[in-house]
Amino acid sequence: MDSHQYEHAPRHSGDFDHLEMQERDDDFEEETQQRLLAGEDVEATDEPDYKVEWHLRTIWAVLASILAAGLVFTALVLFTKHFIVSDNPSDEVMEVSGIGSFRRPASDYILDPAWSFDAERKVRAYKWTITDIVGNPDGVFRPMLTINGLFPGPLIECNEGDTIVIDVDNQSVNATSIHFHGIYQNGTNWMDGTAGITQCPIAPKRKFRYEFTVTGQSGSYYYHGHQGVQASDGLYGPLVIHGRDEKDLQKIPYETDRVIMLQDYYHDIGSKLLVSALEPGSETSPIPNGALINGLNQRDCSELPHRMCDNSSCSRPFFGLTANANHRLRFVNVGAFAWFQVSVDEHKFAITEADGTDLIPAYETRLMISPAQRYSMILNTNLSSADSFWLRAKMVTHCWKNPDLPGLGADEVQAVIQYTKPGGRKIPKSLMSLPSSENWKQGMEVQCRDMNTTSYVPASVEPAPAAADFSYYLRSNLEIGDWRLERGFFNTSTLRPNLQQPTLHRSVEGLTSRNQTFTASSSLNGVNSVAYDLKNDFVIQHTGIKTVDLIIQNFDEGNHPMHLHGHKFYVLGQGHGMFPGYEFLGLQPEGKGILDGHEGALDNLIRRDVATAEGFGWLALRFIADNPGVWAFHCHMAWHSEAGLAMQFLSRVDEVAQWEIPQANSELCTANVEELEKGAAPKDSICDDIVVEFQGNRTVESGNFSEKTNT
Ligand SMILES: [Cu+2]
């Protein structure tokens, strides 16, 4: 466990050796195999030989890396300055890591086989330094945002009831914040990490401690930057919570357990893409250049002549699984935009978890997973036809307005699943040849919609409350408003987070200082347009514990995977076309109870934290608003949420009115607003100049475009 406790300090190019040598012994075989796959000039060999050879190779690797570093250093610095520093003027010296040294060992995402599920509750402490680097995950160099200089971020593994303490030191040129996706944060709303909603961003050169106790939940989660689209620049990592009853609720025992993160991957930095996504006239989201699995892939540089590219330190993702055993694969879609269709050649698998809810095994041949969703798959390695198979993660490009990837983009990333012998430490010769397994014959999925989750049964029965106290109808849409700016809307509101005065701070201060507008509306249940400006700050509030229904009607041809912070919701239903009404769900109008003859309607609903309103479709959710604080509800496609497709729930106003914002949080807000806004979405007002050009002789009134009304 100790290896998980502290991340190492940022690595420099001279650490090339250290990176390889610090592997745990039991990880050695897997790493070795990865290298074999990646390199073309390495012969399969037994472990002792390999060790000797590796030391020899290390010398050459060091010499080569010094030479390579010398040659590319100047180019990297220029590259870095151009892409990172020019957007964010700063005198700070950028840290530029050497080639390959930023790669996190693949073994870091294998869960500890000796994990103590019965351990006493404990504090798990981490020290994270956020740094800008230039890296080449798939071969193409680009600016990235990392934790302790490594990509992707470290695994947080804990037991339910543990306390997580993360000391974040922001050494990036941009402000940042870290959101722990799916974590309830009950009683610690200010640790939710949503910039402009629950906290001010952590300005450059500032520090902040995230500290929260994980209670009442278990399963697969992740964390990611929540300022701008920083997750897309590499600021993410997995978070796994072991439930005390995990072994009972997971109905298929498994031998190994690991995380597989799928990422749509852009060759340009997110802040640059965000500007182009939000500029006047833009009606499409940036399309990824490719995809990564656990940060890995290997592109053919000859196909990318206009990019600085070197794939010699890249490797194809690889998973060594003992034959004739069950293995748990925890898939997390950490991407900004793309859905993934996942399959393993010739293997059926069981789905046993969705977003932290254990499920009765449901057998499938492919998995559809939206951004921010998680699914666990149990894979049985019982085939005798071969001993290596492709795992395919294909981005579902048909869901985009323009399904073509830029240039010679690759919409599918493949990993090798290699059967290994139980306890065997030898590297099979067969590794030298890639799998010849066959893809499933069924056609490509062209719809982006959730798995048929109405057929998935939670392993632990927790019926939804029979009646909703309130039911809200939300129209979701991407609309082109004034100045040809396409923005995301819930009803008539498009969120612009206030980075200097987050909603939580304004709410607590307003309620505790007996500010008239807040106190006058404090007992209100519903949309609060008195204390908050509905146009850019859509807040629905409740006092006491309430059961809340959301009917989301999506007026876009594209889908929106919706995420509610701080809760799991029950998915009452979802589908194409217009919401068919409560009766269709077996419920009374407004959700006020169950219709006769539909008594079991609420018993086995899936509980999760991301569910999708498909294109021109509907989504009906129910959640218990029992968690005090301000909770974001937003589309988890990064480009949509940054365009404003987001709103907030303020729960248990009576409790929040007793709160005091912790001093460390208030302290973050003392940074200059220019510092807080670094790395955030551009303001509509920066389009002033562009609009003047675009609009020609149209009279431009003074003031921000955020002042203009969208209809
Ligand atoms: Cu969306």
Image (tube, rainbow, N blue to C red):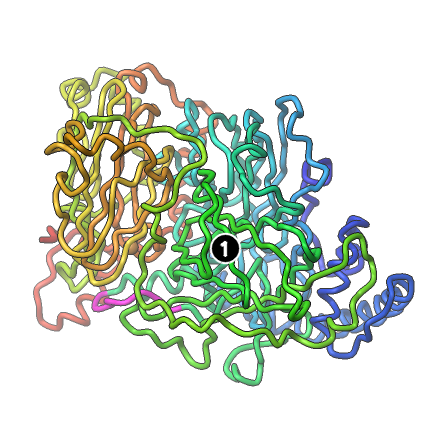
State the image coordinates of residue 302 (x, y, percent, origin top left).
Answer: 57, 85
Quadrant of ligand 1 in image:
bottom left
Q: Is residue 294 above or below residue 290?
A: above
Q: Is residue 83 left or right of residue 538?
A: right
Does residue 308 appear anywhere in the picture?
A: yes
**Residue 88 in sight here:** no
> Under tag 1, what secondary structure?
loop
**Residue shown at 85% from the left, 66% from the top:** 54
Of all residues shown, which one is farthest toward the front? 597
Q: Residue at x 28, y 26 (%)?
A: 651
Task: Report the predominant secondary structure element of the magenta stretch.
Answer: loop
Which percent across, then down, holds residue 64? 78, 73
Tell me which amino acid carries mark 1. Ser
Quarter-of-image position of residue 272: bottom left
The residue lying toward the viewer, choosing from 612 and 603, is 603
Q: Does the beta carbon of the residue at mark 1 sit less than 8 Å from ligand 1?
A: no
Q: Residue at x 69, y 45 (%)?
A: 9
- Image: magenta residue range: 280-287
702 is higher (above) or lower (below) than 435: above
Task: Identify which residue, 704 or 105, lies in the foreground.
Answer: 105
Residue drawn at x 8%, y 64% is: 699
**Mark 1 lies on residue:** 90
Residue 120 vs residue 582, the one in the foreground = 582
Q: Is residue 161 magenta?
A: no
Judge from the rendering whether residue 99 lies leftward or rightward of residue 333; answer left or right.
right
Q: Is residue 635 left or right of residue 308?
A: left
Closest to the observer, 501 or 435 = 435
Q: Give the percent coordinates (x, y) of residue 445.
A: 36, 67
Image quarter (top left, top right, bottom left or bottom right) of the N terminus: top right
Question: Which quarter of the picture shows residue 271?
Answer: bottom left
Q: How far across and down, in percent of the image, does residue 598 sit? A: 20, 34
